[in-house]
Image (cartoon, rainbow, N blue to C red):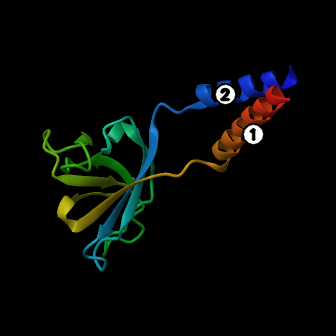
Amino acid sequence: MLHKFVVITALGIMLVSRASADPMVLRATSIFPDALSSFTVTFNDTGDSRLDFAEVTGFSGVTVAGIIGFQPFLVGVPDITGVSNCGGASLAGNCPFWIFSSSTFTTFAAIGNWTYEMTAVLPEPQTLALLALALFAAALSRQRRRQ
């Protein structure tokens, strides 16, 4: 009876804890590293494999040559085919720029200043441990049924 409880509990936890969004990382590599730094944006993709401003969960920051102490937030996402959808701050609804802003300065950076790579984030160790527990419990249950 205990093994059935373990199996049902482990499977239930896995189903309930399944995220409704997939963690993704967008890496933007600067083609002008002396002027602009590379940056990363982490986000929870809701199914279209494109970055939307509302999905953003983290931003590594970006440095701009000649602007000392500029530690900006990401406030606007451009429309980049196959990469991102326009969102956040924009210029009259037009989204050809990344928009970075701090308490003292806002800058607009054209999308052509970076190359882009999108990757999925690997599951956390706790998720893998929970999956292993569920598989172990299922195997144990099957072995006991044979006996």
For label 2, the SS is: helix
Identify which amino acid the numbered label 1 is placed on. Answer: Phe
The reply, left or right, for residue 17 in relation to residue 88 is right
Question: Height in image: 92 above or below 65?
Answer: above
Quadrant position of the N terminus in the picture: top right
Mark on residue 70? none
Return the disc, 2 or 1, that comes first in the chain's sequence: 2
Question: Height in image: 65 above or below 97?
Answer: below
Where residue 115 appears, as percent x and y from the top left, is 26, 65
Question: Height in image: 44 above or below 1?
Answer: below
Q: Residue at x 65, y 46 (%)?
A: 128
> Which residue carries the number 1 mark?
136
Task: Please rate how many residues cluster around mark 2, counting C-alpha atoms within 10 Å: few if below 14, some from 14 to 19, many from 20.
Answer: some
Q: In the image shown, does 43 or 72 lie closer to the viewer?
A: 43
Choose mark 2 or mark 1, whichever is in front: 1
Quadrant position of the C terminus in the picture: top right
Q: Which residue lies most toward the front here?
A: 146
Identify which amino acid the numbered label 2 is placed on. Answer: Leu
The picture quadrant where one finds residue 65 is bottom left
> Which residue carries the number 2 mark?
11
Q: In the image shown, does 84 or 95 lie closer to the viewer?
A: 84
Task: Please rate how many residues cluster around mark 1, counting C-alpha atoms within 10 Å: few if below 14, some from 14 to 19, many from 20.
Answer: some
Q: Which residue lies most toward the bottom here?
A: 34
**Marks 2 and 1 in Cβ contact (< 8 Å):** no
Where residue 71 appears, as percent x and y from the top left, is 42, 61
Q: In the image shown, does 55 or 82 lie closer to the viewer?
A: 82
Question: Height in image: 24 above or below 62?
Answer: above
Q: Residue at x 36, y 36 (%)?
A: 54
Where residue 18 appears, as percent x and y from the top left, is 56, 32
The reply, left or right, for residue 144 in relation to residue 23 is right
Q: In the image shown, does 74 or 45 lie closer to the viewer?
A: 45
